[in-house]
Amino acid sequence: MSIKALVLTNTWMTPIFTEELKNLFESSKDYEVKFKAESELTASDFEFTEVLIAIPSPELLPKFKKLKWLQLFSAGTNGYTEGAAFPEDVLLTNASGTYGLTISEHLLTMALVLMRRFDVYEKQQEQEIWQNAGDLQSIYGSTVVVHGFGDIGGHFAQKMQALGAHVIAVKRTVYGDEKFADEVYPESELDNVLPKADLIATSVPGTKETYKLFDASKFALMKPNAIFLNVGRGTNVDLDDLCEVLAAGKLGGAGLDVTDPEPLPKGHPAWHTPHLLITPHASGGYTLPESRRRFSNILQENLQNYLEGKPLRNLVDMQTGYKKR
């Protein structure tokens, strides 16, 4: 008997990605699969599903009575771990390993734009102003604090080291085998390393511990010309505090791919805060072919492991929300 799988498509899933996933399943006789949008789901779909591949609305989870495994398209697990409304024996896997390349390149781009003052030059171009923006910063010789040292943080640290930066990693658990970091510290040392940083890049998930972690008190610890980047969760940053610090000239610049609230509403002060770059949660996703390839490899491996009763890749600890080591 074939295993019943449901892939929830959404607006962020490009047609080519959907087709690639359909082709992945075509070669397997062990899975019967449906592709549907959330808005198209019926009672029979909830009854059908044993394996769900999606980023489902958490409130839908109790309806999947036969669910045994949820494979997320995302690396983040917000809404699917602590307090999630499905049975404890459901296996949860995330997409860690998919986004390190694309998001680290996004971080690198933001860093260079702000360090080289391209945010200033873009505004000058709009106003037809020919004027030097003054002193610049360089990655070479700088100190970069990478907060969160999983797939994304590790890829970014590698790029920073290659460009001549001194990398300080701050992470929840220090194992001692971390690559691409000159120094490694536990989360409890964050306040002690922030004053050293010319650039801070954070990519941690949204949890109770990280909610508005970066607020006025954290920004006050940073150098007045430091660059702050966040690609984790918007809730990890007090956006009002960040806007105030930037407007007062007490921070060199900031780049956000995630905000709180999200989407960022029209009229919000952040849109017009000086030296603040905002992208619409676009650093990850599946618009990069290599990201689609990496996720497909993870999914294909896990489908085979599930079929054979073997441990799944990227199994998430339901208590912490992090991938098990």
Image: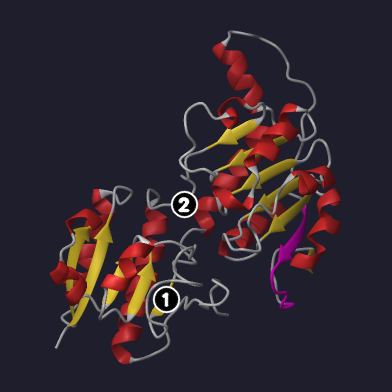
Residue drawn at point x = 67 percent, y = 51 percent: 201
Residue drawn at point x = 28 percent, y = 55 percent: 17
Residue drawn at point x = 78 percent, y = 28 percent: 249
Residue 116 highlighted magenta (yes or no): no
Looking at the rendered structure, the kind of residue marked 2 is: Gly
Q: Which residue is mark 2?
A: 284
* Residue 87 spot, x, y in % from top left: 38, 81
* Residue 59 spot, x, y in % from top left: 35, 63
| Closest to the observer, 20 or 229 | 229
Looking at the rendered structure, the kind of residue marked 1 is: Leu
The dot on residue 92 is 1
In what quadrant of the picture does the C terminus appear?
Answer: bottom right
| Closest to the observer, 1 or 218 | 218
Residue drawn at point x = 72 percent, y = 49 percent: 200
Q: Which residues are magenta?
A: 166-176
Which quarter of the figure has residue 291?
bottom left
In the displayed structure image, the side of residue 108 where residue 293 appears, left or right: left
Nearest to viewer (mark 2 / mark 1): 1
* Residue 216 spot, x, y in % from top left: 76, 43
Residue density around tag 2, few if under 14, some if 14–19, many if 20 or more, within 10 Å:
many
Q: Secondary structure at mark 2?
A: loop
Colour option used: secondary structure
Which quarter of the figure has residue 190?
bottom right
